[in-house]
Amino acid sequence: MRRSQVQARINGADIDFLCEPRQSLLEVLRDELGLTGTKEGCANGNCGACSVMLNGRIVNSCCVLGVEAEGAEVTTIEGVAHGDQLHPLQQAFLEEAALQCGICTPGFIIGAKALLDREPNADEQRIRHWLAGNLCRCTGYDKIIRAVLRAEEHMQEATKA
Amino acid sequence: MTTIEKPTYTIIGTRPIRPDGVEKVTGKAQYGADIRLPGMIFGRVLRSPHAHARIRSIDTSAAESFPGVLAVLTHADFPVAADRVEELGETAVNLKELSENILAAGKALYRGHAIAAVAAANPHVAEEALKLIKVDYELLPPVTDVRDAMREDAPLLNENRYTKELGGAKSDKPSNIASHVQFQSGDIAAAFADADHVVEREFTTKMVHQGYIEPQNSTASWNSDGTLVIWTSTQGAFSVRAQLSEILKMPVARIKVVPMEIGGGFGGKLPIYLDPVAALLSKKSGHPVKVVMNRTEVFEGTGPTSGTYIKLKAAEKGGKLTAIEATLAYEAGAYPGSSVGAGAMCMLSPYNIENFKIDGYDVVVNKPKTAAYRAPGAPASAFATESVLDELAKAAKIDPLQFRLQNSAHEGTRMVTGVPFPRIGHEEVVEAALNSAHYRSPIEGPYRGRGVASGFWFNAGMQSSVVVSVNTDGTVNLTEGSTDIGGTRASLAMQLGETLGIPYDTIKPTVVDTDSIGHNDVTGGSRTTFASGMAVYEAGMDVQREMLKRASKLLNAPETDLVYEHGGVHVVSDPAKKMSFKEIAAQSARTGGPINGKGSVLARGAGAAYGTHIVDVEVDPDTGKVTILRYTAVQDVGTAIHPAYVEGQIQGGAVQGIGWALNEEYYYDDTGRMANSSFLDYRMPTTLDVPLIDTILVEVPNPGHPYGVRGVGEVPIVPPLAAVANAIADATGHRFTDLPISPRRVVEELHGLG
Ligand code: FES
Ligand code: FES
C-alpha cells in the first residue's frame, strides 16, 4: 500500500514520517516512531490506554488515523516530564502507589493532565467523570483518584511558591 | 490498622516508591508488545467462527502465495504432544489438550479457537492473508451452559471422554462431565432433621474474564543454532519455558524466555497461547515474529473463569451452623480443568461446620478453556455460602457478622479436606469489621441496604530462587525471576533491606530471563511476596554469614565473637570494634572475593488469607441501577510489607468482584457466539461505578514466614459477590441468586417480570 508523508510536531519536535492510510495514529506512534509508552488495550476507543493530546484535545489515538496528524501538535506520555523533572501527576502516581501493572498509567496521566490543565481544582466527582473512559483493572481506581487530587495540591503549592 | 504481636521493623511497613515506578509513569517501561527487533515480522491468528465444528480440511495454499506472506502455520506443524498432565502454577493442564488449544486439531471447540496463523512483514497483510485460508467445517451443535452440558443427551465435545468418578472409577458412557470430586464429614441428614432453620437455594454465575488491559503477546526468535528466545508478558517465564519445551519437543536449556513488563494477569497469563505459534512462525520464516492479540481475541480465545451452577442447603441450630450440603457444577470450557475443586475446598473455610457433603463437577462446554482468575473457584462458591448464611442469620435473628463470628474457623478447625488450620485470622477480621466505623454507622433511606460477606483463599508457596550480589560501594543487586505484576520488586527489596539492615534505595531489584537465574514458579497464588520473600531472606542470611567471615579477618576476631546487626558487624566482647555493611563490602576483593548470597526455597507454610467486606448500596427499582454507596474491605494480611500495595491489591480485587456481581458476563447467543466481546459491551467497572474503597489491614503474622507475610492478592475478590447480593437483599427484600445482578435483572425480578 502507498505510504503518505506526514509532518507533525510530536512532543515538541518536528517529525516527518511515512504511514499507510490505514494505520492508526497509535500504530504510527508505536510501530513507526518507537513511542511505545502509548498503549493499546482495545484498539476501538473503549479503554483509554492509547490517550494522547492532539492539538490540545485529548483523543484515543487508536481511533485517529496517522495521516490525520498532518500539521498537528501531538503530546504523548514521553513528552509529559521535562527531562528528569517528573510532572506533578507522575510524581503523585508514584507516591500514592496509583499503579500496579502500570499498563493503564500513561493513558490516565495524559487524561488527568488534560483535566488539570483546564480545571486545577477539579473535585473527586469531576475527576471520576473525566476519567470514566480510562479503564484500570488493577487498582479499583481508589489510588488513581487520590493521586490526581494529590497532584492538584502539588501544583497549587508550586504556583504559590 | 490493627496490629497484633508485631515486631518493630525499619523498612517493612513503610511506603517507599517502587523501583520500576519512574519507567512506568514516563512510558519507558517495555511491556511485551513494545519490543521491536531487527527484521521482525508480524503474526496473526485465524480463529473459528463456530462454537463447535469438525475441521474436515484446511487449505492454506492461497495464503501462502499471497504477496508479503512469509509463513503459514497449522496444528500439523506441531510435534505430537504427550497425553500427560503438567502442573501449571494454580492449574494443571494436559499437554495434548494444551497444544490443541493453541492450534485446533480435528475439531474447533469454541468460537475463537485458534485454527491457523500467518506471518508477514506487515500486520495488515497478515490479517488479509487470514481471509485466504479455506477451512472446511462440519458444523456440530454447541452446548454452552453447564447444566445443558451435563444432560445425557447433550452434544459431546469429545466422544472419548468419560467421567473420572470418585476413587478413580470411570463412567460407563462418554460424558461432558470430566470429573467428580466429593468432600464429606459427619451426618448431614441428622443435622438437617434437628435444625432450627434450613435454607436451600440454587445459584448461578456467568463466565467472566480477568479483564487485564494488556492483551496477550509473544515475540519469538528462532536462531540458526537451534535456540529459541521468547519475549512475552507472562506470570511465569519458567512455566512458559517448560510448556514450550514440551510442545516443541526442545530441551529446556535451548529456550530462553524473557519476561517483559506485564499489563495485568490475575491468573489469565499463566497459560500459554501465542508463544509456540510465534516460535514456529519464526522457525518457518527465518525472521523474529511478533504476535499480539486484539481485544476480541482476548475475550474469545483466552481463558476466562467458569460459569457455575451451585445448589446449597444449610442448617442452623441455636445460632450454630450445623450442616451444609452442596452441589457445584463449574464450566471448564473446551477442555477439562475448571477450578471446581478449589471452589469446593474454599466454600466452608471461614467456618467451623461438623456436618457437610459437597459434590463438585468439572464440565466441558463449547466456550474457551477456562484459566485461573484470582482465587480461582472461590468467589462463586462463596457467593452461595455467604448468601445462604445471611438468610440463616436473619432467620435466627442474629447480626450477620456476629453469626459469622460465632461460627468462625480458627486454629485447629479442620478444612473440608480434613487438614487442620494453623494460626488464621478470620475471627480477628470479622471483629475488626464489627468494630469498624462503617459497620457502626447507620444505613437509612428507601432502597438502601448493607451487606457483608467473608472469603477465604489458601495462598501458595512453591519454588523461588534469588541471588544477591554485594557491590564494593555497598549497593546491592537483587536478581530475581518472579514476574512483578504489581509492586513485588519493591516488596522483595524491602524484605532484603530489612534482613541486611541496609537502606531500601541501595538495593536494585531486577527481574531477569530464564537463562539468568534458577527456577521460579509463577507469580500466582499470591505467592511472590511470601515465597520469593523467603528466598530473599535466605539470600540475605547467606550474605550475613559471608560478611561475618570477612569481618572476622578484618576485625581480627573469631566469628564466634561476632554478630551481624543493624547493617553491620561488631565484636560482642568489644562492641566498639565494628564495621558497617558498606565497609566490609569495600574490602571484599581483599578478603576472599565477591560477596554473593543465594536463596533457593520450596516454600511451605503459606498462610491462609481471610477477608470480610461491608458494602452499602442503593437500588433504583425503576432503572435497576445499583449504586455502591460505601465499601470497606477488611483483611488479614499477615504483615503488610508495603501497605500501599497491599491496599491496592484489596481495592482492585474488591472492584473486580463488584463488576462480577453487577455487570460482567459472557453473553452467548444460541449459536455459541459471545455477543459482547468488546470492553464497551462487556462493561467492567469504570471510575464512575465505584466509590473510594476503604481498607482495614488486620495483621495476624503468618508463623510460616520470617516476616509473617501472608499472600494478599487473591482473597479480596472472594467476598464481594455475596456482600453486594446481601446488600441488595437488605435494600429490596428480594434475594438475587443469579449473577450478574444487572439493571435488567433487577427490574425483571423486582417487578415479577422475566
Ligand atoms: S486502545 Fe485506544 S481506547 Fe483502547
Ligand atoms: S494498573 Fe494495571 S490496569 Fe491499571
Image (cartoon, coloured by chain):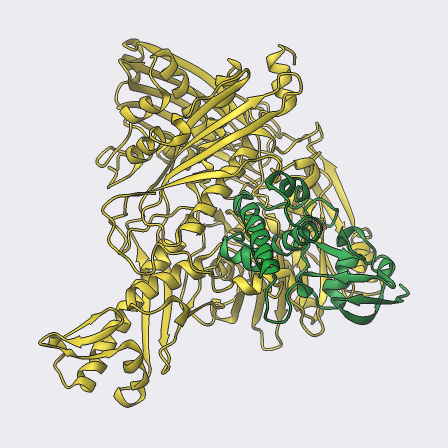
Chain colours: A green, B yellow
Classify residue B438 by image quadrant.
top left
Where is A114 relative to B440, above or below?
Answer: below
Where is A5 relative to B134, above or below?
Answer: below
Across and down, in percent, residue B426 comes to 31, 35
Q: Quadrant of the N terminus of chain B?
A: top left
Which of B257/B587 is in front? B587
* Residue B219 shown left or right of residue B305 in the figure: right
Residue at the farthest bottom position: B590
Residue at the farthest left position: B573
Q: Quadrant of the C terminus of chain B?
A: top right
Across and down, in percent, residue B667 comes to 66, 31
Classify residue B67 by image quadrant.
bottom right
* Residue B672 shown left or right of residue A146 in the figure: right
Across and down, in percent, residue B306 comes to 53, 35
Which of B677/B52 is in front? B677
Is residue B61 at all visible to an observer of this figure? no
* Residue B308 shown left or right of residue B663 in the figure: left
Classify residue A2 by image quadrant.
bottom right
The residue under the point 31% across, 23% down is B402
The residue under the point 36% across, 68% down is B503
Across and down, in percent, residue B130 comes to 78, 53
* Residue B397 shown left or right of residue B56 in the figure: left
Which of B31/B345 is in front? B31
Count the labels in the image.
0
The residue under the point 29% across, 86% down is B587
Residue at the farthest front position: A160
Where is B472 relative to B369, above or below?
Answer: below
